[in-house]
Image (cartoon, helix red, strand yellow):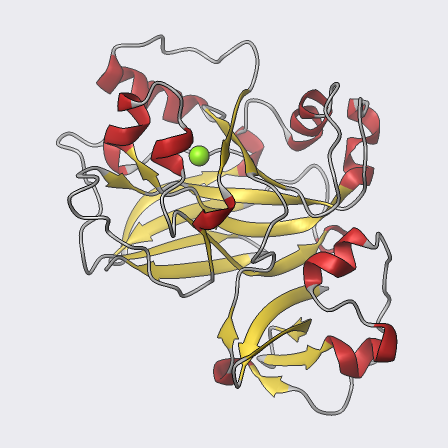
Amino acid sequence: MFLISYEYKGKKGWGVANPDKRVIYPANDIFGENTPNSLLGFIQDESTIKLDTYPERGLNMDQVKLLAPVSNPTRNIFCVGKNYLEHIIEIAKQDNTAQKPLEHPAFFSKATNTVIGTFDVIPSHEGITEQLDYEAELAVIIGKRGVNIPVEDAMDYVFGYTVLNDVTARDLQSNHLQWLKGKSLDGFCPMGPWIVTKDEISEPVELNISSKVNGEIRQESNTRHMIFDIPTLISILSQGMTLEPGDILATGTPSGVGKGFVPPKYLKKGDIVRVEVEKVGYIENIVK
Ligand code: MG
């Protein structure tokens, strides 16, 4: 199922999307009076839905503004850095660091002010950063509260998946020692176009992932190349740290980021960045 958040005629809503027909069925029309007022609320309820038939009528997807599926996360977006070997190598060449996998996942987070929707504008933050970069990532949406989750149970805690661009100011990322600042400027977390529930994606999750800037392919890989796979990431992150339904975990980016090129190919005003994950969808954001 494809669960989507949108704004229509100035009102926020959520519902079930039919991507082939480009139609959204508002949640109210499906679930009735007790519909949670946001997709996040629905996930937090830890309820599940089955939809045997779609309502007769829905909203045309082209008439609504697509919001990030979870547009107001309750806490920071969890991320993992250096989770694809080729990306470790491209960054290590620039920074003169070790060209080998880390022993433990490099967890960090992005603040919630970063979240923007499927086709929203990425601010260029001129005068603040001169090294604006993109990172194509598959994000996992947690569906169930849990702590100390064993690897073999970890997939039970997944609600679904979305596409995420871990936009980064490389200069700020290195200037401030911790990555938080360079990863957390406004608009630095485009997400969308929806959450694909996990039943739609076979496990282990092996999906083609790519990014393009102005149509030029920059990143092209498959999530099977993650160093720490999704169950391992969830298990380790949850050790002594309770995960909540609605938490978002970005699983790392493959090689081909702007910083990895010689000379680097950082984003500039007017660039259109498209991030795509097989079976999940794509987001496309212009830099302004
Ligand atoms: Mg990243």
Q: Which residue is drawn at 38% across and 61% down?
A: 284
Lateral position of residue 284 relative to residue 150, left or right: left
Q: How many marks?
A: 0
The N terminus sits in image quarter: bottom right
Q: Which residue is drawn at 81% across and 32% down?
A: 146
**Height in image: 4 above or below 149?**
below
Q: Residue at x 63, y 43 (%)?
A: 140
> Where residue 172 appears, x then y in whole percent?
28, 30
Lateral position of residue 123 relative to residue 239, left or right: left
Q: In this view of the protein, which residue sits in the foreground, 97 or 221?
A: 97
> Where residue 26 appears, x then y in whole percent?
70, 79
Using the rendered view, name the quadrant where residue 287 is placed: bottom left
**Height in image: 279 above or below 24?**
above
Q: In this view of the protein, which residue sits in the foreground, 102 or 167?
A: 167
- Report if residue 253 is visible in the image: no
Q: In this view of the protein, which residue sits in the foreground, 114 or 204?
A: 114
Q: Which residue is drawn at 32% across and 52% down?
A: 212
The C terminus sits in image quarter: bottom left
Q: Quadrant of ligand 1?
A: top left
> Where residue 188 appears, x then y in whole percent?
39, 47
- Report if residue 249 is visible in the image: yes
Lateral position of residue 89 relative to residue 276, left or right: left
> Where residue 199 appears, x then y in whole percent?
77, 53
